[in-house]
């Protein structure tokens, strides 16, 4: 939904990380249940901060604040925070290290961790499948324009990030921890002074942080189609996911927080914050003193991979950023494809996005189309260069969710 434009790089000095302090009435919190999650509460139930709202075999959904269950549907739970709700959270369910490592995937499922790089894939499933791998990669190759939350976590929350990475390494039996960074001399200097792990220097152009491209840089070749990282001896976790693991182990706080970048181009606002999961974007903007004008729109996530949002959109574990942009920068109405091939040239994997979208619109897409879709990591490069403003990335994202 977004038409990217060149953006200035984040400042070299990472913004200070702070909890977004809630006002007296933070508004209802909304939690998507996710596939397979069964509610464990009813409408009218009182809940405490960190309480399980729904549970699946791979993750839990927990309330970030104390309150009352207001509505319950097959797809979402809404909680009205109590007037006494406080943020940031204190320890909820301290977990002794021995207990956590008795079954580490079960621990990850219990704290409710899903991929905070944006994919929302259950961390428990990833770690369980990765037992026996040789290498754990801290994915800090933050390449979306204008985002700085990964950089800030690296520089200001070193103990939690490194603690999470070492916990994963211990759980899967890996002896090697690698920190993947976008090429940035200033950041590299700071990181070398903080981290005693191997550095993997990547390119400084989008989409350097894509999982498959990191694997190519790490192993020397692009993994064959359909091959997952654990099959080549690697498990990758985003910085925020490892931070959440470290916080759960150290402080007993489950995955009810979301570190993100708040950026308002016209207002000159650039803050890295930790906010409650479930908080509406409108509430966040209000409490941070950002007034949304009729000429501005909201993008949830990055400029390339993000999607258009509204003030009612809730923040999830996968929300890496909230960006306020002029509406004229949003994607104009789509036109007819002119068959220029720009999307093919832009695709880092050499796919044919426009033809793939066309094939996937068939009731029974070909096996070749399904295989290509499985390779696509939805970077959005195809949409960004399309002169006809075709929403290729959105179409591919929709097809990916349908095919799963």
Image: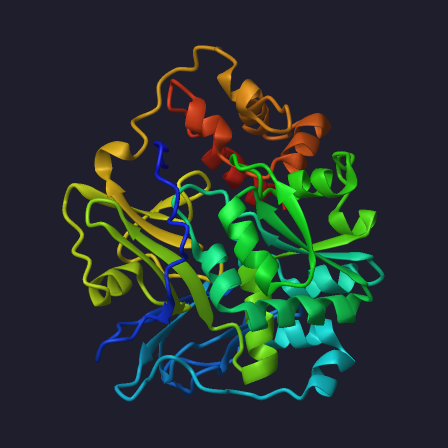
What residue is at 67 percent from the left and 40 percent from the top?
A: 212
The residue lying furthest to the right in this view is: 132
Q: Is there any visible trace of residue 201 in the rendered image?
A: yes
Image position, residue 166 (x, y; %): 70, 69
Image position, residue 157 (x, y; %): 51, 69
| Snapshot colouring | rainbow
Q: Nearer the viewer, residue 224 or 135?
A: 135
Q: Is there any visible trace of residue 35 in the rendered image?
A: no
Q: Nearer the viewer, residue 368 or 243?
A: 243
What residue is at 25 percent from the left and 65 percent from the top?
A: 283
Image position, residue 203 (x, y; %): 58, 36
Left or right for 309, reference 150: left
Q: In the rendered view, tell whether residue 222 sits above or below residue 115.
A: above
Left or right for 66, reference 128: left
Query: Which image quadrant for residue 98?
Result: bottom right
Q: In the rendered view, tell whether residue 50 sits above or below residue 303.
A: below
Q: Nearer the viewer, residue 159 or 209?
A: 159
Q: Nearer the viewer, residue 297 or 234?
A: 234
Quarter of the picture containing the N terminus is top left
Image position, residue 339 (x, y; %): 48, 11
What residue is at 41 percent from the left and 57 percent from the top?
A: 14
Count of all numbered marks drawn on residues in the image: 0
Query: Which image quadrant for residue 246?
Result: bottom right
What residue is at 75 percent from the left and 39 percent from the top?
A: 226
């Amino acid at each position: 939904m977004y038409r990217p434009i060149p953006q200035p790089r984040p400042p070299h000095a990472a913004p200070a990380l702070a909890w977004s302090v809630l006002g007296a009435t933070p508004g209802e919190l909304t939690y998507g249940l996710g596939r397979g999650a069964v509610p464990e509460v009813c409408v009218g139930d009182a809940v405490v901060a960190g309480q399980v709202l729904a549970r699946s075999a791979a993750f839990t959904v927990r309330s970030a604040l104390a309150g009352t269950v207001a509505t319950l549907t097959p797809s979402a739970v809404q909680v009205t925070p109590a007037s006494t709700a406080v943020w940031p959270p204190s320890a909820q369910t301290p977990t002794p290290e021995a207990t956590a490592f008795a079954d580490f995937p079960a621990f990850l499922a219990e704290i409710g961790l899903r991929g905070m790089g944006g994919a929302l894939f259950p961390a428990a499933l990833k770690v369980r499948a990765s037992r026996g791998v040789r290498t754990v990669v801290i994915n800090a190759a933050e390449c979306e324009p204008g985002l700085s939350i990964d950089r800030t976590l690296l520089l200001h929350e070193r103990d939690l990030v490194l603690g999470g990475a070492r916990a994963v390494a211990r759980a899967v039996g890996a002896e090697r921890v690698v920190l993947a960074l976008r090429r940035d001399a200033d950041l590299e200097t700071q990181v070398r002074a903080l981290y005693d792990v191997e550095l993997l220097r990547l390119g400084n152009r989008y989409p350097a942080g894509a999982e498959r491209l990191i694997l190519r840089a790490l192993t020397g070749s692009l993994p064959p189609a359909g091959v997952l990282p654990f099959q080549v001896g690697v498990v990758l976790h985003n910085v925020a996911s490892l931070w959440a693991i470290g916080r759960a182990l150290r402080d007993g706080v489950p995955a009810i927080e979301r570190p993100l970048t708040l950026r308002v181009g016209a207002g000159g606002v650039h803050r890295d914050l930790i906010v409650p999961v479930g908080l509406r974007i409108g509430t966040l903007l209000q409490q941070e003193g950002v007034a949304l004008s009729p000429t501005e729109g909201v993008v949830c996530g990055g400029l390339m991979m993000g999607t258009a949002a509204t003030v009612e959109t809730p923040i999830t574990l996968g929300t890496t950023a909230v960006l306020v942009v002029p509406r004229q920068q949003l994607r104009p109405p789509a036109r007819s494809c002119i068959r220029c091939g720009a999307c093919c040239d832009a695709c880092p994997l050499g796919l044919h996005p426009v033809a793939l979208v066309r094939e996937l619109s068939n009731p029974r897409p070909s096996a070749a189309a399904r295989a290509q879709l499985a390779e696509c990591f939805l970077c959005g490069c195809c949409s960004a260069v399309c002169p006809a403003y075709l929403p290729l990335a959105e179409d591919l994202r929709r097809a990916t969710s349908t095919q799963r």
